[in-house]
């Protein structure tokens, strides 16, 4: 900071040092803390950059003004820098060797009584914090999270530019899409009865930029989806590092993204271990079988095994002729009953019948709720197959519903890994999930539908669509996963109209429906489209991982509540009758709940 004539400050609150002793300095910021030592008063002054300690002596002209100041007053002060004395140094602060002896104070912004304390931090409801988010953002931990977010975004931007990508923006007002999540729609005043939609992602626009010949595109893109909140999903809006590349293979996209992610994570968590390039690649079906999830946490060393063949001719009805999966865990023989009960409860909460297990005693005999149903041959085969030794345990589940089976085994893997302290600390383990099925069967209607992104190129192209069972066709789709968090989905795009029409036909869409819903992109592909593909890692989730936070609201400056409300600004809110008339809209609101229940 420079400029001695500045009316508010000549230095920042993290800048005064022993080299400044004897100099006149002006600082500005918020009163972080006050300590009155019976005449001499110490203020800690905080700004965006750090904290300085102010000393106000009783004979100072500033003492009278200081009497009326409370925490979080915004002030500017002038004074002389002096040493604290070696016995009073504070090594935790960069400014901890000096004080500013204040000669003048000016109150720039008085603070009324606060709804909660900024320092020390107090335990108050999230609703109150969100209502007064501007005050909440002054808290050190949250403030540092937002500054970290800014630096991470800047690092991504610099890295992408260095790799030859063009930063471009795409429209915020666009058309509604029938695919994907629920849109936020915006009524048009100039076109009565018609609506814009806020983009769920710049998907079609970035593909059109490839058709337009821009070759390499990126954007820190805002995306809008009318979804329920989760710990790793913010309702309303989120941001992603949107990437698209022309004339690129899946391997080239992987290589580019690995370079970007490895570089940025190593920059911001240098003390931790980040997966070396190239990241492991795990086919979707293998991930579901081995980890029970398409976003596996590879810090967890446990894995799932298929032992269906062991029970193929079993007399145990619960397993006979059904898929059976197991997880072997070491040293659980002496675990308390509550350890097993929590596993059982968790499985039941997932809709299962409960967990089953066997334990290997020191003698080599087995015990547990499943032990009496296993004959000698099955027991010997299971112990050999899983490598279970005395003291170990084997957890089981069986179901004809493979989705439920994977979900429950995934839960058990996560529960056991966490409960037994097996999750490696100080690790960021990336992987690619590849080879997603192009189609799936709707269990309710029996209809063939797209599994994920309908605009992906099927592996094998037109030949696969014409000759293979749709449920056997794989797509050039991939997810980027880190520590059990899905950071992104991406794909090599289907850039050929003939293949796209056929792909949609298999899912029950006519050519006319494709033209109506995706006409802009189809028309573009008919004028010479390059092969292209991309991905869009989520900024919010990346910052959440690097900042070691469990909730996205801790890394977003102005997040919505779990119910999708902006409690600070009062959104969503009602609009006036005049605004509705201009938009040619009449409200048809649901009856209040009490009227419905009484009606």
Image (spheres, grey):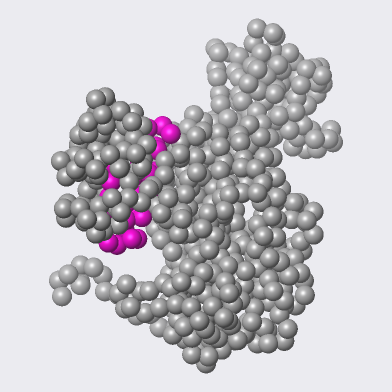
Return the residue nearer the eye: 210 or 507.
507
Answer left or right for 411 relative to 256: left
> Is the residue 29 above or below the residue 261 in the image?
above
Is residue 421 a member of the stretch shown in magenta? yes
Answer left or right for 566 relative to 17: left
Total tally of numbered discs in the picture: 0
Q: Quadrant of residue 487?
A: bottom right
Taken as a whole, is the magenta stretch helix, strand or loop? helix
Q: Quadrant of the C terminus?
A: bottom left
Write the residue at 34% across / 35% down: 388
The location of residue 522, given as percent across then percent down, is 62, 85
Magenta range is: 395-422
> Is the residue 581 above or below the residue 385 in the image?
below
Toward the front, the furthest residue is 377
The location of residue 24, given as percent across then percent down, is 80, 23
Is residue 385 at all visible to an observer of this figure?
Answer: yes
Return the residue nearer the eye: 156 or 140.
156
> Is the residue 452 above or below the residue 298 in the image?
below
Is residue 580 a member of the stretch shown in magenta? no
Answer left or right for 187 relative to 268: left
Write the residue at 48% across / 68% down: 437
The location of residue 337, given as percent across then percent down, is 21, 32
Return the residue nearer the eye: 103 or 477.
477
Toward the top, the furthest residue is 87
Write the residue at 28% across / 46% down: 396
The location of residue 261, given as percent across then percent down, is 65, 49
Write the residue at 58% across / 30% down: 32
Q: Quadrant of the N terminus?
A: top right
Return the residue nearer the eye: 543 or 411.
411
């Amino acid at each position: 900071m420079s400029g001695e004539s500045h009316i508010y400050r000549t230095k920042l609150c993290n800048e005064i040092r022993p080299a400044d002793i004897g100099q006149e300095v002006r600082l500005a910021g918020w009163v972080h803390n006050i300590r009155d030592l019976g005449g001499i008063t110490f203020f800690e002054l905080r700004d965006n950059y750090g904290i300085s300690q102010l000393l106000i002596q009783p004979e100072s002209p500033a003492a009278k003004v200081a009497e009326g100041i409370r925490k979080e007053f915004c002030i500017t002060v002038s004074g002389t820098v002096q040493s604290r004395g070696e016995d009073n140094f504070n090594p935790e602060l960069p400014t901890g060797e000096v004080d500013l002896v204040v000669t003048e104070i000016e109150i720039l912004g008085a603070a009324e009584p606060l709804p909660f304390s900024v320092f020390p931090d107090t335990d108050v409801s999230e609703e109150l914090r969100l209502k007064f988010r501007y005050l909440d953002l002054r808290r050190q931990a949250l403030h540092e999270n937002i500054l970290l977010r800014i630096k991470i975004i800047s690092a991504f931007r610099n890295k992408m530019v260095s790799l030859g990508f063009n930063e471009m923006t795409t429209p915020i007002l666009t058309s509604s899409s029938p695919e994907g999540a629920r849109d936020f729609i915006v009524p048009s005043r100039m076109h009565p009865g018609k609506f814009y939609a806020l983009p769920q992602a710049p998907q079609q626009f970035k593909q059109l930029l490839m058709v337009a010949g821009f070759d390499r595109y990126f954007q820190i893109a805002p995306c809008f989806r009318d979804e329920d909140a989760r710990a790793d999903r913010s309702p309303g809006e989120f941001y992603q590092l949107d990437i698209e590349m022309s004339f690129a293979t899946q391997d080239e996209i992987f290589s580019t993204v690995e370079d970007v992610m490895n570089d940025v994570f190593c920059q911001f968590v240098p003390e931790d271990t980040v997966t070396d390039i190239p990241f492991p690649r795990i086919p979707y079906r293998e991930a579901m079988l081995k980890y029970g999830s398409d976003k596996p946490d590879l810090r967890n060393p446990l894995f799932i095994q298929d032992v269906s063949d062991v029970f193929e001719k079993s007399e145990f009805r619960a397993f006979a002729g059904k898929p059976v999966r197991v997880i072997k865990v070491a040293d659980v023989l002496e675990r308390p009953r509550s350890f097993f009960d929590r596993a059982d409860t968790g499985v039941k909460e997932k809709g299962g019948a409960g967990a089953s297990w066997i334990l290997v005693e020191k003698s080599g005999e087995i015990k547990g709720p499943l032990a009496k149903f296993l004959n000698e041959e099955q027991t010997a085969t299971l112990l050999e197959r899983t490598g279970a030794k005395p003291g170990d345990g084997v957890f089981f589940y069986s179901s004809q519903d493979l989705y439920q089976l994977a979900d429950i085994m995934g839960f058990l893997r996560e529960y056991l890994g966490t409960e037994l302290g097996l999750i490696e600390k100080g690790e960021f383990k990336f992987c690619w999930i590849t080879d997603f099925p192009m189609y799936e069967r709707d269990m309710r209607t029996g209809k063939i539908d797209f599994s994920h992104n309908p605009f992906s190129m099927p592996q094998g192209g037109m030949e696969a669509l014409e000759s293979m069972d749709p449920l056997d066709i794989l797509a050039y789709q991939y997810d980027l996963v880190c520590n059990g968090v899905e950071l992104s989905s991406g794909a090599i795009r289907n850039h050929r109209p003939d293949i796209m029409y056929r792909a949609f036909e298999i899912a029950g869409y006519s050519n006319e429906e494709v033209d109506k819903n995706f006409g802009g992109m189809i028309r573009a592909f008919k004028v010479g489209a390059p092969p292209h593909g991309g991905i869009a890692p989520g900024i919010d989730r990346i910052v959440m991982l690097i900042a070691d936070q469990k909730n996205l609201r801790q890394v977003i400056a102005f997040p919505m509540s779990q119910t999708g409300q902006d409690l600070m600004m009062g959104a969503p809110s009602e609009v006036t009758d005049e605004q509705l008339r201009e938009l040619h809209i009449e409200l048809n609101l649901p009856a209040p709940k009490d009227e419905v229940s009484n009606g």
